[in-house]
Image (spheres, rainbow, N blue to C red):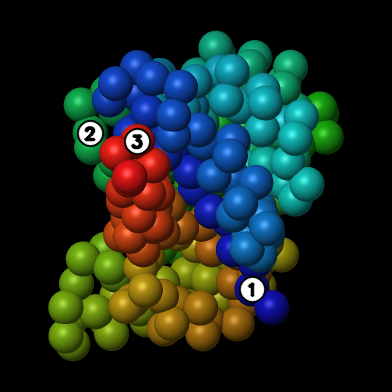
Amino acid sequence: MIRLGVNVDHVATVRQARRAQVPDPMEAALLAEKAGADGITVHLREDRRHIQERDVELLRERLKTKLNLEMAVTPAMVAFAETLRPDDACFVPEKREELTTEGGLDIVAHRRKIQDSVKRLQDRGIHVSLFVDPEEKQIETSKEVGADAVEVHTGTYCNAAGAEREKERRTVASAVSLAYRLGLEVHAGHGLDYENVLPIAGIHEIVELNIGHSIIARAVVVGIEQAVREMKALLKKARG
Ligand code: PXP
């Protein structure tokens, strides 16, 4: 069975919108585990727009499955991960102005820095993956720098429609196949939702999908009836 890593970043996005205590990504993560999530993913961004250090520390202590920390390849983040020791780390590119991770990490251009960072985390027992575009050269270089896994970027596939989407699915499938043949563990993610996930989940060499925004978006919608009912019941208690 393919593993599902649930990214709870956007629970923290809602909390940070009011600098409040709720909704708590920890509580969401524990419920996600109860519902069958095989792991929890968070991205500690440089600008701390959603997940905070404290969230990651609490998740590290309390998760029953595994913690996958998405992170930029910076000295500060590498030092944080070395101390925290998540089960998995996934190196991603990061730009302050982007809405979300816009493309894969350029392993070819940043080879030396990535190679050193992969080794530092592996020396602490962390399983390291690299988030890459579905391109041959990036996959081959991921193997050369010693990564344990690659997470193939599915964003272009998700944004395409019709025949273009099938073409992008094939591009993802051939990158996956190359990574598998090179002996890398293969993950995929970004932009996956209830409508587009099946053709990707059908690629057999992929052992893990990381999905965030669509699951949190759906949780808000399917949970609103109960949330309103509970508030109405409280108000009714006050006035009879
Ligand atoms: N995988 C990686 C490496 C990511 O950076 C993200 C976004 O944080 C995801 C998966 C999840 O993407 P989405 O929120 O679009 O499901």
- Residue at 52% across, 36% down: 25
- Give the labeled residue for mark 1: 2
Snapshot quadrant of residue 218: bottom left
Look at the numbered disc 2 and say if its residue's Cβ is closer than 8 Å to ligand 1: no
- Residue at 23% across, 37% down: 99
- Residue at 32% across, 78% down: 195
Real-space Cα separation, disc 1 to disc 3, in angstroms: 48 Å
| Left or right: 235, with 132 as reference point | left
In the picture, the disc for residue 98 is 2
- Give the labeled residue for mark 3: 238
Determine whether 79 is above or below 208 in the image.
above
Earlier-in-chain disc, 1 versus 3: 1
Query: Between residues 147 and 43, which one lies in front from this camera angle?
Result: 43
Q: Amino acid at mark 1?
A: Ile
For label 1, the SS is loop
**Between tags 1 and 3, which lies in front?**
3
Snapshot quadrant of residue 22: top left
Badge 3 crowding class, 10 Å Cα cut-off, few under 14, some 14 to 19, many 20 or more, is: few
Real-space Cα separation, disc 3 to disc 2, in angstroms: 46 Å
Residue 43 drawn at (x, y percent): 48, 34
Question: Is residue 104 visible to us here?
Answer: no
Which quarter of the image is occupied by the N terminus?
bottom right
* Number of on-image labels: 3
Snapshot quadrant of residue 236: top left
